[in-house]
Amino acid sequence: MYGPVNINAFDLASEVERVQRKLATGLESLRSVGDTAYGATGKQAVYRDGRLTLYRFQGEHTSQTPSRSNAGARPPILIVYALVNRPYMVDLQHDRSLVRNLLARGEDVYIIDWGYPDPSDRYLDLEDYLLRFIDGCVDHVRNAHGLDAVNLLGICQGGAFSLSYAALRPDKVGNLITMVTPVDFHTPDNMLSHWVRELDIDLFVDTLGNVPADLMNWCYLTLKPYRLFVQKYVGLVDILDDVPELENFLRMERWIFDSPDQAGEAFRQFIKDYYQRNGLVNGGIVIGGEPVDLGRVTMPVLNIFAEADHLVPPDASRALRRLAGTRDYTELCFKGGHIGIYVSGRAQREVPQAIHDWLSRRR
C-alpha cells in the first residue's frame, strides 16, 4: 500500500498562479505570432515531372548556372526524402538546417520535392518513383554539371529508395549517404514493422485508393502516444511567453501535419516488398523487371543512424554493413532521435561536418 501524498498548499497555489500567468501571457504571444514560415535557404526549380519538382539550393557561393567545364568543382549532393513527409525538414529554419550547413561548407545541394499526390496518381508504382522520377533527377544533375555520377543522400524511406536506385543504376551514383534508413525491416524492436507485417495491404489499398495523410500521421503518433499526444502539449505551457520558442514549436507542428497522401500502388508495393517480405535482406524486390540486389551497391557508403530512433531502430540500419557490396563502408551513430538528427543543436554541429569530411576524402 502506498501512503498518502503530502501536497504543500503554498507550492500548489504558486504553481497554479504560474500557469495562469503563462496562459495569460501566451494569449498575447499567440496574437503576435504570424504565419510560421519555413525554409532558411533560397532555391530554384530546375526540373519538373508531374508533381515532382527538383530544386537547387542557392548558397552564397552557388553559381546560378552549373558549369560543365569546372573540373575542380565538387560533385553535387542530391537529397532524396521520404514520401510520407515534406522535405523542408532538412531546411526548417535559419538555425536548424542541414542544407544551410552543407552549403556553408561548400557543397552544392539539390532536393526532390515529391509534391502532393491526388487521385490521378493512384497507380504510380515504385518503378515510376525510382526509374522515372529519381532517375530523371539524377540525369538532370549529371547533365547540368557534365558528370557521370552524382552524390546521393537518401533520408528514411528516401534512403531505402536511394539504396534500391543505387543497386539498379550503380554507374550513376558516385557516393551514397543514407540517413535514418531502414534496411532490415524485421528487427525485433521495429514496432512499425510489427504493426504492418500482418496487414491485408491489398484490401487496404483497394478500399482507400490513395492512403490518406491523416491516417498515416495517426499511426506514427500512436507509436509514442504519451510523448506525442500529451507531454509535448503540456510542455507547451512553459514556452507560451517565449515568442521565438513558440514559433519553433508551431513550425514543427506544421511540418508534422503537412503530410501528403500516399499513391496507392507505390504504397502497396513498398509495404509488401520492404516491410512484409523484408526484401532488401531476403531479396525478391523487382523494379521495372530488374532485381534489387544490394550486392551491386559498390560505391562508397556513409550510413548515418540515430541511437534513440523509434521509427528506424539502429539495428535496422546497421544491417547495411553486411549486405552492401562496397568495400568502402562507414557508419556514424548519432546521439539523438529520428527528428533530432535534422534539427537539434548537436545535429547542426556534427552531421553536416561529418558528411562534408567524408565526401572530401572521396572527391
Image: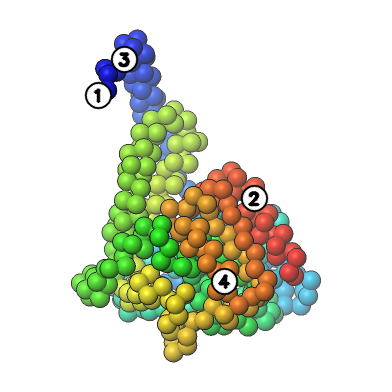
Residue 24 percent across, percent down from the top left: 35, 24
> Which structural element holds mark 1?
loop
Classify the position of the N terminus by image quarter: top left
Taking 144 as reference, is 250 left or right? left
Q: Could you tell me how far apart the alpha carbons at marks 3 and 2 are, in whole angstroms? A: 44 Å
Is residue 47 or residue 286 the one in the foreground? Answer: 286
Q: Residues within 10 Å of mark 4 (few under 14, many from 20)?
A: few
Marks 2/1 in contact by CB < 8 Å: the verdict is no
Say left or right for 195 vs 55: left
Which residue is at 35% across, 48% downward?
Answer: 224
What residue is shown with label 3?
7
Q: Quadrant of residue 118?
A: bottom left
Q: Is residue 81 above or below residue 171?
A: above
Disc 4 marks which amino acid?
Arg
Q: Which residue is mark 1?
A: 1
Residue depicted at 44% across the width and 31% down the height: 239
SS state under label 2 = helix
